[in-house]
Amino acid sequence: MPTCLYCEKQFPVKIVIDGKQHNLQRRKYCLDCSPFGSRNTRKLVLAKKPPIEHYCSICGRCTTARRRRRCQSCCTKIRRYLAKSAAVQYLGGKCQRCGWEGALPAYEFHHLDPNSKDFAIGNVANRKWELIKQELDKCELLCSNCHRIEHSKHDQVLIAEAARYKGRLLRGDS
């Protein structure tokens, strides 16, 4: 007698249903778990394999993703790095103000018109290259120093006001 894979009860090989004898030797489930004629051919019990733990080859973090050598975070970082590398090459590979050439992390993208900015270039891990190029055409490639100088120009009014400040200082002077 076969055993039901769901309830683990044994059931007969031959049975009479509606006056007709039926052979049940190929059934995986008993008639209580999978009624006759219900066309229930899907697996009632899915044999779940325990997840296999892998360790990311870059950061060493444990991941259960199948067929992966790296965790999702490291894959995203790699895609961002590749996109930034291609973007730097697209814009000439050096600072457009001072001509500095150096390490990739020191380059920044300055939007010439902040109002036309659709997205930040630094977070383009999953965008199409055509969209990235459209956004790069609105930018200039600057080194970190030139980018800080560019944004500090907006602070000149604040710096001038601080020089004229005659109120109480924050140092604790009375």
Image: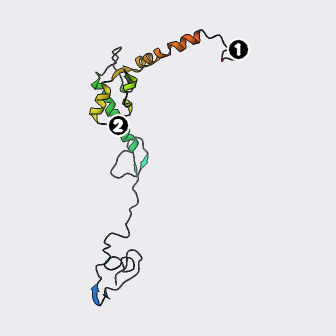
Quarter of the image for residue 30 reads bottom left
Query: Which mark is drawn over residue 125?
Result: 2
Residue contact at pointers 2 and 1, CB within 8 angstroms: no
User: Horizontally, is 12 left or right of 174 in the view?
Assistant: left
Q: Quadrant of the C terminus?
A: top right
- The residue depicted at 33 percent of the width and 17 percent of the height is 96
Residue 54 in the image: state x and y as whole percent.
Answer: 39, 50
Residue 25 in the image: state x and y as whole percent.
Answer: 29, 82
How many neighbours does mark 1 have within 10 angstroms: few (below 14), some (14-19), or many (20 or more)? Answer: few
How many neighbours does mark 2 have within 10 angstroms: few (below 14), some (14-19), or many (20 or more)? Answer: some
Residue 17 vs 162, above or below: the answer is: below
Residue 81 in the image: state x and y as whole percent.
Answer: 35, 33
The local secondary structure at tag 2 comes to loop
Amino acid at the residue labelled 1: Asp
The local secondary structure at tag 1 comes to loop
Scheme of image coloration: rainbow
Q: Nearer the viewer, residue 54 or 89?
A: 89
Q: Nearer the viewer, residue 56 or 48?
A: 48
Q: Which residue is mark 1?
A: 173
Label 2 vs label 1: CA separation? 51 Å
Quarter of the image for residue 21 reads bottom left
- The residue depicted at 32 percent of the width and 69 percent of the height is 42
Quarter of the image for residue 34 reads bottom left
Q: Is residue 86 visible?
A: no
Q: Is residue 128 visible?
A: yes
Residue extending farthest right: 174
Closer to the chain start, of discs 2 and 1, is 2
Residue 93 vs 72, above or below: the answer is: above
